[in-house]
Amino acid sequence: MSFKLNILSLSAIALLAACSSGTPEEETSVGAIPSWILNPQVEDGIAVSECVLFSGNMSIDKQQALANARTSLAQRIETRVSAMDKTYRDKIEVASGVESGSTFSSVSKQVTQQTLTGTNPIKTDVVKIADKDNLCVLVAVGQDSTKDIFESLINAAKRPMSAQQKDVLYQEFKAQRAEQQLDAELEKLKG
């Protein structure tokens, strides 16, 4: 009986190892790093990943990584809101001469905070980066949450617009271009 349990245990370990090695990785100057860390993505949503050096205290490290991820997610949302504000001014205000209502940026902090309050990590793992253990988390808001954020912004800003104008703004809000602008700005700060 003991022999059978050992074989089953070994089979389970082999299966787990095979499953965990299926995570796509990208080669970097400090070694292979999982793609979900380097290029976090969710379909029609907004995703970020953050890592902290692993201290051995999973609870504290996870809280720190999650707090950092929520901050990064808030920055991504605010960048998209900023791009949406610009689109509204460029395409809608100019064409219609509308001047009343708040900017989307002015109401974004409150809407973002409400959205991120219950955000939990989609994925958590201890990953070796530059020969050091890091606790990493992946946090995201999906398509439904992204649409809810957009609707909350529109309602809070009280800006008059047609369904077509609203659709143009939603497409801008979802656009990857806004995230690329944020990444470029962050790179300038690092350099």
Image: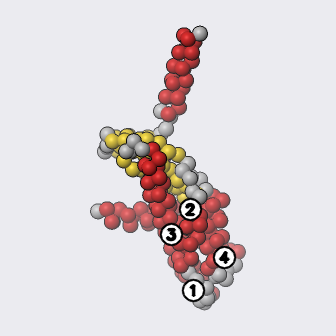
Q: Earlier in the sequence, mark 4 or mark 2?
A: 2
Give above or below for 62 relative to 31: below
Q: Residue at x 57, y 57 (%)?
A: 119
Q: Nearer the viewer, mark 2 or mark 1?
A: 2
Q: Residue at x 66, y 59 (%)?
A: 144
Visible residue check, residue 163: yes
For disc 3, the marked residue is 78
For disc 1, the marked residue is 94
Give above or below for 117 relative to 34: below
Alpha carbon of mark 4 to alpha carbon of mark 2: how far?
A: 18 Å
Graded by Cα atoms within 10 Å as few (under 14), some (14 to 19) or many (20 or more), the crowding at tag 3 reads many
Q: Secondary structure at mark 3?
A: helix
Q: Secondary structure at mark 1?
A: helix
Q: Quadrant of the C terminus?
A: bottom left
Graded by Cα atoms within 10 Å as few (under 14), some (14 to 19) or many (20 or more), the crowding at tag 2 reads some
Can you give x and y, in whole percent of width and height, for residue 51 in the image? 41, 50
Alpha carbon of mark 2 to alpha carbon of mark 3: how far?
A: 12 Å
Q: Nearer the viewer, mark 4 or mark 2?
A: 2
Q: Nearer the viewer, residue 105 or 135?
A: 135
For disc 4, the marked residue is 155
